[in-house]
Image: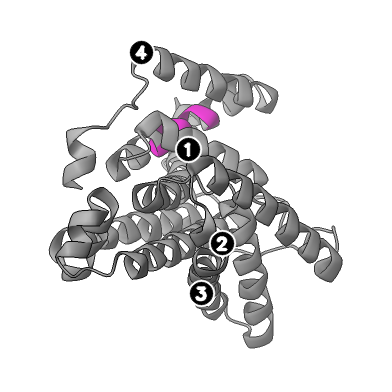
Amino acid sequence: MDRFVFLVGTGVARGTVLALFALSLVLIWRAARIVNFAAGAMAVVAAYVAVAVATATGGWWWGALAGVVAGGVLGGVVERGVMRYATTPLGGVILAIGLVMVLQSVLGILAGPQYVPVAPPVSDAPWSVAGVPLGSPYDLLVVVVALGLMLGLRLLFTRTTLGLQLRASAFAPEVSRLLGVRVARMRTVAWALASAVAALAALLLLPTELGLNPHATDVLFVLAFTVAVVGGLDSPGGALVAGLGVGVLMSLVTGYVGAGATPVAVLAMLVLVLLVRPQGLVAGVEARSA
């Protein structure tokens, strides 16, 4: 039982990071109907900026702030300079894959293939209550930051004029143009917002992995894409639910069966959801009202 509680706790922390990264994919899908296959590579670029700033200032939080800003700027530049010229969803996918190759090649040349260790800002040693391990202070920090950001995005989209314009531009661009909304600008804002969210998710994950290298977020992107599909590509709420589910599933399978069985379990979950509910676990009306 002690082991089960510990695995669920670590799974929730991992799941919130997956949900956060999946949310960035959902935001871009809603804004441009493009799956951003370059999200992982773009997040790695922001992570390198974050690590450089953290090393120079000696503060993880300054590095995190710089990484989020860099991610947002990069997202806006990519939308304005690359993705705006994608006239079809397939064209967007091809451009995104090409961007991945360019970014990872440039990072490999500039930074090299070696892993750069990234220390967590707080202890990652697990707490123990009455002899039962319940996760670490870093797990708690990850959950609080991720859920706080999701709540902030929820308020942005439901309680602000900017959020209303973003939603209108995504679902009815022609009508929005007639009403005076600058749809192209809203699309750029959505890309910047999504890239900043992805950068933060990558920064939260790096201390729990091998470290930072040009391919550090490849697995994160694959898992987050699975989460987005399972939850429903149009549904921010689905990303949260599916992220927590996939995170806990991965943790339990790793703890009781072995790390080698984790990809099989995630793939089985994806296939099952696609067979039973291909539009995602939380989709449809919820997506339009979020």
Q: Which amino acid does label 1 sit on?
A: Gly
Precedes in sequence: disc 1 or disc 3: 1
Does any portion of residue 206 appear in the rendered image? yes
2 and 3 marks in contact (CB < 8 Å): no
Judging depth in this view, the residue of 178 and 226 nearest the camera is 178
How crowded pointer 4 is (Cα within 10 Å; few <14, some 14-19, many 20+) is rated as few
Q: Which amino acid does label 3 sit on?
A: Val
Tell me the distance, in whole angstroms, between the alpha carbons under discs 4 and 3: 39 Å
Residue 134 located left or right of residue 78:
left
Judging depth in this view, the residue of 282 and 135 nearest the camera is 282
In the picture, the disc for residue 73 is: 3
Precedes in sequence: disc 4 or disc 1: 1
In the picture, the disc for residue 11 is: 1
Residue tagged 2: 203
Q: Which amino acid does label 2 sit on?
A: Leu
Range of the magenta residues? 243-250
Q: Residue at x 34, y 42 (%)?
A: 240
Vertical side of 4 occupied by 88: above or below: below
Q: Which residue is drawn at 60% across and 60% down?
A: 42
Precedes in sequence: disc 4 or disc 3: 3
Tell me the distance, in whole angstroms, between the alpha carbons under discs 2 and 3: 16 Å
Tell me the distance, in whole angstroms, between the alpha carbons under discs 2 and 1: 17 Å
How crowded pointer 1 is (Cα within 10 Å; few <14, some 14-19, many 20+) is rated as many
Asked which secondary structure carries label 1, the reply is helix
Tell me the distance, in whole angstroms, between the alpha carbons under discs 4 and 1: 24 Å
